[in-house]
Image: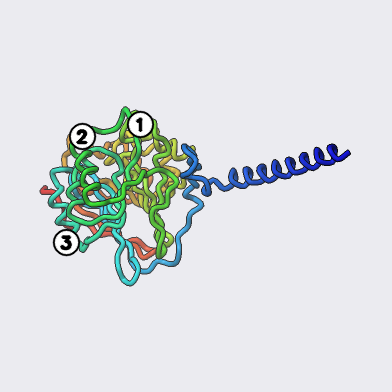
Amino acid sequence: MAQKRASRKKQTVGGTILTILLVIALFLWNNPQLWEGWIPGATPEPSSPSSASTEGEPAGEAKIWYIDVGQGDSILVQLPGEDGGTANILIDAGTTATKNTLCQWLQKHNVDRLDIVIATHPHEDHIGGMAAVLQAIPADTLYMPKTKSSKTPTTRCYENMLDAADEQGVQVKEGKAGLVVYQENGALLELVGPTRQDYDDLNAYSIVARLTYGERTFLFTGDCTKEAEEDMLQAGMDVSADVLKMGHHGSSTSTGDAFFQAVSPQTAVITCGVDNDYGHPHREILALLEESGIAVYRTDEQDTILASCDGEAITWQTGLPSVVEK
């Protein structure tokens, strides 16, 4: 009889322990952020950017500079920061040919520190000046896309960028859809692309960033391809924006119909060089914008372009100093 009671007691204790373990397992399963990082290979899916929101009200005027670097991209976002300061965010850094003049331009516009730097993808017309910028101006964090191993660049400007980041103590992070990289004073900068890491075209890896400031939104697309655009839509990314930086300098390889409709912009900005060898912007894109009745700004025709936003209205200035001779 005593043996039977002991056996039943062991069964009861065993059942209790099993129940506790099941409860713990279910809790961890539903709260992956608690075990991320200490279980090898365990990485929870990123949350959708649509769940993020701005914090507080706009504290002043945001400035978005589409810098004329010729046939390339460089965009400076300046947001009102704490105690009257400014948060500086640089998206791409033009070509190797304009690296010195770009650094001078940034310093002339009181950029003494970069809070965030985004290298949309590793092509020379987007990262050619990045090493020089990182060496000239202190920066906190550099976001880059992660590519599959067969597409890892071996170019000198790419290696120089990584070396400069390492030498200057810049934190390098992977840029991918689902990340919120800035969220203060009525401003939200979130990444809505790329959604994959297995493209064959480096342009498809372009980091696509969406800035919300008050009630207005801006979309920065790098050289994002139609394939990557479709992937963003299928992933449920919110790409709607008042202002669209046209993908790939206005190339017909970007800005598919479904993506364009999802963005539904009021204004488009095209960054390209005068009489460039690629024929950017392509006539198909210009026809699309004209048929849609959208206001268009072009760096090849209007030099550096500035959008100033107070959270409600956006005002535009053109003909501002370039970093390339025309």
Q: Is residue 165 above or below residue 248?
A: below
Residue 32 appears in the rendering: yes
Relative placement, left or right, of 319 versus 204 is left
Which tag is nearer the camera, tag 2 or tag 3? 2
State the residue at coordinates (39%, 34%).
197
Relative placement, left or right, of 30 versus 178 is right
Residue at label 3? 108
Residue at label 1? 148
Residue type pointed to by label 2? Thr
| Residue situated in front as seen by the camera: 181 or 257 | 181
Q: Which mark is first along the chain, 3 or 1? A: 3
Relative placement, left or right, of 18 versus 193 is right
| Residue situated in front as seen by the camera: 230 or 124 | 124
How far apart marks 1 and 3 lie (CA) works out to: 38 Å
Q: Which mark is first along the chain, 3 or 2? A: 3
Residue at label 2? 155
